[in-house]
Amino acid sequence: MGSGIRPRTAPHPSHHERLLAIARATPWFMQALVHVRALCLPEWCVGAGAVRNLVWDALHAHAAPSALADVDVAFFDAADPTPARDAALQATLQAAAPGTPWEVTNQAGVHLWFERHFGHPVAPLRSLEEAVERVAAKRYAQRWPRVQVVER
């Protein structure tokens, strides 16, 4: 939803419009986007968990939003990949929306701490798009090991 991320292939128009309509009709999500946009990051997006929940809630007519473990804000800025910057941005969001469980990560710096947290190194990422693709591919492979994604 941030600048710089574009799907490789255009989504089906009706799906795209439906997602936009759901997002626009969801006050907490729109407010989250406003807060993240105010950070003026060069390339960013709100993670899939928040998007998944807002779609789930809309499709199942939930009156109240489903609980979120966090609202992931992924961004890419190679100029300052330090954890201190992530923490400062997260603090800014917490101050703006204290009831929202924010988690902010500069994808340009993931390779600097990943091995310490998860036990194996990862190569540096070149863009937010690459980060989103890598995470999505890993999650699908873990959850559905026999499914093969075929791009047209």
Image (tube, grey):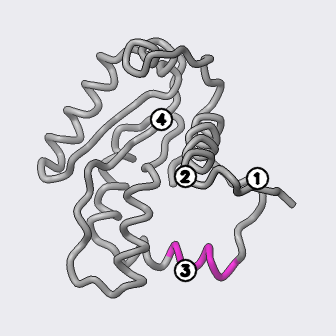
Sequence-wise, the earlier of marks 3 and 2 is 3
Assign a secondary structure to mark 2.
Answer: helix
Q: Determine the residue positioned at 46% across, 54% down.
A: 48
At label 1, which amino acid type do we have? Arg
Which residue is disc 1 drawn over? 8
The front one of 38 and 77 is 77
- Any mark on residue 75, and which? 4
Crowding near pointer 1: few (<14 within 10 Å), some, many (20+)?
few
Assign a secondary structure to mark 3.
Answer: helix
Find residue 73 and report its horizontal and vertical position in percent: 39, 42
Spatial distance from mark 2 to mark 4, Cα to Cα? 25 Å
- Above or below, 142 against 105 in this view is below
- Any mark on residue 18, and which? 3
Sequence-wise, the earlier of marks 1 and 3 is 1
At label 2, which amino acid type do we have? Arg
Q: Quadrant of residue 127?
A: top right
At label 3, which amino acid type do we have? Arg
User: What segment is highlighted magenta in the picture?
Assistant: 13-20
Sequence-wise, the earlier of marks 1 and 4 is 1
